Amino acid sequence: MSFLDPDLSGPWAAVLADRYARADSVSLLRAMILDVFPGRITLVSSFGAESAVLLHMVSRIDPDLPVVFIDTGKLFGETKRYRDQLTRHLGLRNLQIITPDPARLKAQDPDGMLFSRKPDACCFWRKVEPLERALAGYGAWISGRKQFHGGARADLQRFEAVDKRIKISPLAGWTRDQIAAYFTAHDLPPHPLEGEGYLSIGCMPCTARAESGASVRSGRWQGLDKTECGIHLSLSEARKRANL
């Protein structure tokens, strides 16, 4: 079975969900990478607090799989150093670092402070638009989202159809304890900021420490009516949210 027609991405998501309903995460990834979308799938990773799990799985299936990393220009230095550490540690051979378009940033965020005025627009130009460019030509991409993160992710399915691509979340049903157990079982290095109370790590200006006992993503965009950056919306929805 191979993915042929992007216009049929909606029906395909349902077909894949049914066919792989009983597959564990590694078996699911192996099938998607090697059989269903060979040469047309990528892993998008933030190299955040939980990212090493999927990266480790992928490294054991195909270390040459493209791994897309969006460097927004506002990331913690610790995240970029962790990215380099994990890439070496896991033997990943196809890391693709994508950056915002300089001309668009100059026009839309000349002082670098758009995050303080229009955070959704900042996310669009620094994350959504670069990712859309990076995904050109792919039929599917792999995401690390999980239901236990709550909010819009609480009802997350393993297969979704968005903008004529299949989005795959192999860890959708995993718990926080399962993530921790996988780190221990495979001796994976933690993100250096996790020990300082950062449980979900994005751009530096919009990421804070989570309060004790709070939800994983409670440190993101604190004080704002915002819980997602927009890369998991359709492109039209992300544009609308950013008032573009």
Image (spheres, helix red, strand yellow):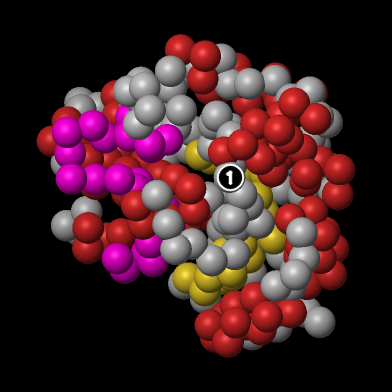
Image quadrant holding the C terminus, namely: bottom left
Residue 57 relative to residue 131: left or right:
right
For disc 1, the neighbor class at 10 Å (few under 14, some 14 to 19, many from 20) is some
In percent of the image, x 58 and y 56: which residue is there? 172
In percent of the image, x 79 and y 53: which residue is there? 26
Where residue 36 sits, quadrant-wise, is: bottom right
How far across and how far down the image is residue 44, in percent?
Answer: 59, 47
Image quadrant holding the N terminus, namely: bottom right
Residue 144 relative to residue 31: left or right:
left
Q: Residue furthest left?
A: 117
Residue 172 relative to residue 130: left or right:
right
Name which residue type carries label 1.
Thr
Is residue 51 visible to us here?
no
In percent of the image, x 44 and y 45: which residue is there? 149
Pointer 1: what residue? 175
In percent of the image, x 84 and y 70: which residue is there? 35
Question: Nearest the camera: 229 or 130?
Answer: 229
Indicate whether 223 appears above or below 152: above
How far across and how far down the image is residue 90, in percent?
Answer: 80, 30
Residue 61 relative to residue 221: left or right:
right
Indicate whether 11 appears above or below 93: below
Magenta region: which residues?
215-237
Is residue 170 visible to us here?
yes
Where residue 208 sits, quadrant-wise, is: top left
Question: Nearest the camera: 50 or 87?
Answer: 50
Query: Secondary structure of the magenta portion, mostly?
Result: loop
Residue 218 counted in the magenta span: yes
How far across and how far down the image is residue 47, in percent?
Answer: 58, 32
How far across and how far down the image is residue 210, in percent?
Answer: 35, 25
Indicate whether 41 appears above or below 74: below
Residue 174 counted in the magenta span: no
